[in-house]
Structure formats: structure tokens, C-alpha cells
Amino acid sequence: MNEESKQKISQFVDGDLDQAEAISLLKEMYSSPELLEKYNRYQAIGHALKNDAFLVTSSDFSARVSQQIEAEPTIIAPQPKSNFFMLYQKPCALAASIAIVAVLVHWREPNTIATNPSALLSSPLALSAIGHQLPAAPVVSAPTDQQQPVTPRIHQYLQAHNSSIYSPDATELKRLNQVAYSNKKQP
Amino acid sequence: MNNQAKPSDQVDQELVLRVQRGDKKAFDMLVIKYQHKIIQLVNRYVKDPSESQDVAQEAFVRAYKALANFRGDSAFYTWLYRIASNTAKNYLLNKLRKTPQYEIDIQDAEQLENLPELQCLETPERLLMNDELLEVLKLTIASLPEEMRMAITLREFDGMSYEEIAETMSCPVGTVRSRIFRAREAIDQALSTLLDK
Amino acid sequence: MKTPFLLIAIILPTSSLAADEPPDGKQILEKMAHAMHSLNYQGTVAFVRGGKLDTMAYYHATQNNIEQERMSSLNSPLREITRQSGRVSHLYPATGIHMTEERPFEDSFLLNIPKRIGELEAYYSVNVLDDDEKVALLPAYAIELKPKDQLRYSRKIWIEKNNSLPVRTETFDVTGQQVEEMSFTKLEIKDKLPILNAMEQWHGLAEDKRICAYKTKIVDFATAPFTADQLPPGFHVLFFTQRTLKPSDQPVNHLIIGDGLSFVSIYLEHSQSNTANYQSNGVQTIGSVRFYSQPLDNYDLTVMGEVPEETISLIANSIKLKTDKH
């Protein structure tokens, strides 16, 4: 690790790097455990000077978070029309191509449920659609074949949403039965 | 992009945008940037460095899940701070509910920081290590050349910017950068023997 | 005999003019909205949602300004649902379980449509697709309600010509995929149908068989711990309630918003200790319903409805806790 990198880390701790330099350094720390360790130690030193207590972040903290995030679906979020996001100046090619392919796939294959991004992108139509520049697409739902089982709470919400349509199933009726009997016992 | 924002906020804005476009690595970089601050914040409630890291990890995961709906109404760190403090408070409340003497619901989570039973969760070994580290830290600071000691003190204790320190010490900003870096590096070298154990 | 001749002479030209004019979709829908609530009729209705078929015996009675709607399932689990005076009650005869809830924002199990169709025109265009279709052997108009944006689903409604009742509806998502269908397989108009005592059967059960599972009540939205100020265009607050959903003892805030055709539910409740009550996996789908959950400070927020994913997302974005406002 050279002195220049260490000094950059020291400046980064103090917010003294510009945006490009900061992002570049974060990328370097992401792939260099040594640099990350140095950053953690500089921060611990600052904390100790102010608080009389040492608190060193474990070297694998960010890797553990990263591992947990990896199991989460990728976010592709709608960009609200605000100055902060300025989405219409920075369109997302990937999300836009999903939006276009959703329309084209349906036209060609009307029975296809166009909610699975992987299926959409593997469609031959996807190849011609990628690269079109449009505003970002709406949130893409989790692929249907990978959806986790719905929680009991969500079932309860469904019933409350429209009870004439979403009736309790046998398990829920049994639970209601138990709940109602316990309510009945209360004075 | 808000060109009036501080460089640190601009970094956050850029990384948040990238996360919201599907770049998970950009979130990893946000974790790297704020991990220490968040662990520090959580530790004020939890008072156990090891558990603080677990709770901080949960806070980051909650933040990731909620990031699709982050609207930029506040700075990213402010938003993350709120998630982390709520995660820590919830953790404590749940912990206390499992403790027999706290069967009564605690209405005000703000009181949690001051509960005496939660204030001494350090092990004797950790307390000893902490004392040793602080001792070495103080000795190292005391032994630094005057200009390095002054620069690091103005930065860490008084929170001055590099420009303000440069003005105070009547030297260029580049010199301030260098002095602060060399002070940190000297402290780190002195502590490395203990920290690497 | 001049008068009858004149009468005929006047009527005929008018009729021939009427035959040449294209049908007015808005007028047809308004007639339908009136007929649904003013006629007595019964039949058999099939609902298809998320690929599942549910067949119900349907019954609508109106007498002395009291209106009652009932459906009885023809398949297990047997249940009866009754709507009267803004209240919906459910009865499961096999177990004796009974539930009631207030739903004053809804007025039909078949199709919710505002009485003034003009309220929809800002967001939907009304088109007559066909004026000579047949549903359950009844001649019908086919009307399309096509959204003017990507924030809602489109609908086709078949309205039988003689009495202006809806006999079939289909709902399509933004890709054109059908997500819901309602269809009468049998429909009879009656001069009169009795208003039944919905609770009579329940009261007829032995006392140890009578179980009231829950009751909801209307609550002023101003007392809610959150606001929903920037809803997507066309959606507005309809109804707010706080109810207990077991196993939690904490009240669940339930806000219903709508655009005249679609409803969206917003749930906000205090986070449980292990946050196991929500999954934040992006917008998910059950049948025709999209839903999305996320933490919001100390709460868990869930938004669900028969609307596109983007609408779910926008609605979730618009929910702000009152503690955020300083």
C-alpha cells in the first residue's frame, strides 16, 4: 500500500476528496482488504480521540452485509420527478429495454406474463430493444418462479383488502375459530 | 444532481442512484463509507461492540430493502441514521422484554440509553484492551511534532475543515492534509501491535 | 283518431334516428350504475381471479330504499356474504364463524363504478366496442374503460340491453394480460325479492356455535400516524380503519384509496420483533393483486391492490409518517 493511497484515505475520512476521487477510492477499498483495514483504523482513531473508547469495525463487516444483500432482489426503482434524481437526463438502458420488450413480447406472445426480467431479456426481441434510451421503467416484480411463499400476514391483508374475494382458507378458518373461542372466553 | 450539495452528499447521491438502477456494488460502497459511523451510533444504545456490529448489519440490510423508495427528501446519511437508530432501539426493546425485570412495556425508547443495567456490557478483557489502547494513543499524540499534534487536534476535537485549519495555522491546505495524514499514520503504527493481536 | 296517428308519426322518425346514432358509452354506463342498485335480480356468477374459479349464487334486493346484496358460495368452504347499509358480513355456516366490517366506499360485489361516470373521464376513456354481443344468451353492449395512463388497469364491461345490468367484466393489466373476470351464467330479473335478515341464520345456531371473529369500525383518517398527500393522479382517500389482526395486539392502520374503479389498501403497523411480518422483495403478485412491503421507521408498510407495479410503488412513496414533518 503506497503513501499516496493512505493519504487519500486520510482525506476521505475528512470528506476532503471530490466526488470522482471519493468514488474511485471506495472502489479500491471494495477490492482491497488492506486499504479497507486502513480506513477502518483511521476512523477508529478519530472515534477514540473523541470518545475515549476504541471501536474497530471488523474487517469482514462490509463483506457480511454484502453477502446478505446478495440474497435480496436487485432494486430497480422508479425515479420520481425531482431535481435530486434528474432521471430524464440519465436514462437507464437496462430498465428501459425491459419496458420495451414487455410490450413487444406481449404483442408477439400474448399469453406470456411479462413480469420475469430474465425471460424478457432472453427473448430474441430483447436484443433489438437494448440500447434504446427511455425514462426508467417501473419497479420490476420478483420473477414469479422465484417468489417466496406469501406470509400469513399478507393473506390477512388480502382478506381485509377485499373480503368478498379473498376468503380465508381452511387453515385460516381454523385459526379464526381458535381466536374467536378465546375472545368468547374473555369477559 | 444537486450541485449545491457538499462533495460527501454528492457521492451519496451518485451511489444511491446507482443502487436504484440495480448496482448492488454501489450499496457495498455506501456500507464501507458509513459502517464505522453506524456501528458507533448503534453502540451508543447497545453498548456491546460485537452485538453492535450485528445490529448495524441488520440496519444496513433494512436500508437496502427500503432504498427503492428513498426519495432524496433528506440526505442519505440522515435517512440511514434514522433507520439505524430505530433498529438499535427495537433491538434493545426486544432484549428488555425478554429480561424478567422489564415485563412492563417501556413506552419511551429514548430512555433506553440511560438504563444502568445496559451500561456495562464490556468484558474485563475488552476493558483492559481499551485502556491499553487509549494509553498508547495519548502517549503517541503527546510525542508528535507540535504542528502535527495541532493539526490532528483541530480536526478531530474541534471539527475544523482543512481550510479553517490552514487559516488557523497559517499554512497551505496541502500542508494541513499532509500533517493530518502523518499524525494518523504515526498513531496507527503505534497502535498496530496491540490491534493486530 | 288523429292523435294516435300523430303519435305514431312522431315516434317513428325519432326511432329511426335513434337507430342511426352510435350508442353513447357514458350513458350506457350511467344506466347500468342506476340499474344495479334499483332492480331486483338474482343469478349465478362465476369469478376468475389468478386462474382460480369461484362460483356464487348472487342475489340483489331493493325495497323501500333498503338495498341488500348477497352471495353464497357453491363450493367449499361454504360461506355467505351480505352487504347492506355499507356493512359487509360473512357467515361460515359449517363453523358458525361470523365477521362484519364497514365498507361504505364499496357498493357492489360485482363491479364498483361511480354513479357519475364523468368522474372517471379524466383517467379513463369510455368506448363502445360492440353493440351486438351475447352473454348468457342475453344481447349486450361491450364497453371498454381504457386508462389514459399506465397507472391503472383497463376493463371491458358487457351490459345487457334490456335492463342495463352488467353481465360480464374483464380486467386487463398494462401488458394486456387478463387478470380478472366476472360473468353471469344465469340471470333473472324479478319484480320483487325479499330483504332477508342476514343474521337470522347465525342467530339460529346454538349459542356455543356462534363466534364473532372480528369487527372493524370507521376511524377519522386525521388521527392516523401517517399522511398520504401525494397519491398518483386520480387516487384519493376513501376510508380508514384501525383493526386488530391476530396474532398481534397492536392495531393495524388500514387506509383504502381508489380512483373510482380500483381500490388500493395501505397497511401500516408497528414492526414486530423479528420483522417476520413483512417481506421486502420488490413488488410481488398474488393473482390479480400486486403488493409491496417495506419498513418505515418503526413501522411495516404494505401497499396492495389491483393496479400496476408502478402505481404500487408511487403510493408507497407517498406515505409519510407524521413524525417526519417538522
Image (spheres, coloured by chain):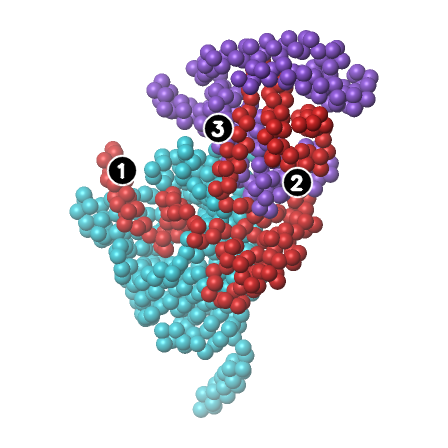
| Residue B77 in the image, given as x and y percentages of width and height | 61, 32
Q: Amino acid at mark 3?
A: Val
Q: Which chain is in red here?
A: A
Question: In the rendering, which numbered label is found on residue B55?
Answer: 3
Looking at the image, is A15 positioned above or below residue A111? above
Question: In the rendering, which numbered label is found on residue B57?
Answer: none
Looking at the image, is B190 positioned above or below residue C140? above
| Residue C285 in the image, given as x and y percentages of width and height | 44, 52
Mark 2 and mark 3 on one chain:
yes
Q: Nearer the viewer, mark 1 or mark 3?
A: 3
- Which residue, as the protein is rendered here, is positioned at the far left? C206
What chain does badge 1 belong to?
A: A
Question: In the rendering, which numbered label is found on residue B14?
Answer: 2
Residue at image location 60% in from the left, 35% down from the top: A31
Under circle 3, the secondary element is helix
Chain B: colour as depicted: purple
Q: Amino acid at mark 2?
A: Glu
Mark 2 and mark 1 on one chain:
no
Residue at image location 48% in from the left, 20% down from the top: B48
Whether residue C235 is visible to the viewer of this picture, yes or no, is no
C-alpha distance separating marks 1 and 3:
37 Å
Which quadrant does the N terminus of chain B fall into? top right
